[in-house]
Amino acid sequence: MQRMGMVIGLNAEKIEEYERLHAAVWPDVLRMITACHIRNYSIFLKEPENLLFSYFEYHGEDFDADMKIMAADPATQDWWAVCMPCQKPLETRKDGEWWASMDEVFHHD
């Protein structure tokens, strides 16, 4: 299992919409998340900076391959189409990233 942390900005005028969307995530999207070996997935909001922090555990063997499967899923593409306008990617993210990946510096069970 690999713990993953990512961060992205959230447009202030889209906070309510983003929270509403995530209060009722589409079942097909949730099924794809599970099918791609993601477990224990949470998203946190830090205001007033309007930063979203996501944490999840990846239980698969090939994260990049699973993310390509997810990206090819029509329901996921539709979900991203409504969520992405709410988000504000960090300027410092790596090439090819939407959510900026983070390095784990500490863990305690």
Image: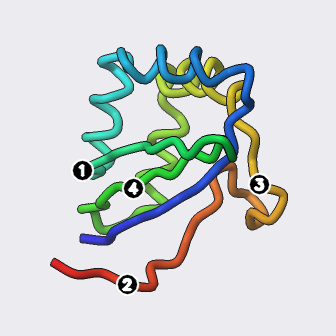
**Mark 4 or 2: the one toward you:** 2
Cβ atoms under marks 4 and 3 closer than 8 Å: no
Percent across and percent down for residue 80 are 59, 27
Secondary structure of the residue carrying tag 2 is loop
Left or right, residue 100 beside residue 36: right
Secondary structure of the residue carrying tag 3 is loop
Q: Give the mark nearer the N terminus: 2 vs 3.
A: 3
Q: Give the mark nearer the N terminus: 1 vs 2.
A: 1
**Spatial separation of the CA atoms under disc 1 and disc 2:** 18 Å
Q: Quadrant of the N terminus?
A: bottom left
Cβ atoms under marks 4 and 1 closer than 8 Å: yes
Disc 3 marks a residue whose amino acid type is Leu
Left or right, residue 30 beside residue 76: left
Picture disc at residue 40:
1
Residue under numbered circle 4 = 55
Percent across and percent down for residue 101 are 58, 65
Q: Residue furthest front?
A: 48
Cβ atoms under marks 4 and 2 closer than 8 Å: no
Percent across and percent down for residue 35 are 27, 41
Residue under numbered circle 3 = 90
Q: Residue furthest right?
A: 91
Q: Give the mark nearer the N terminus: 4 vs 2.
A: 4
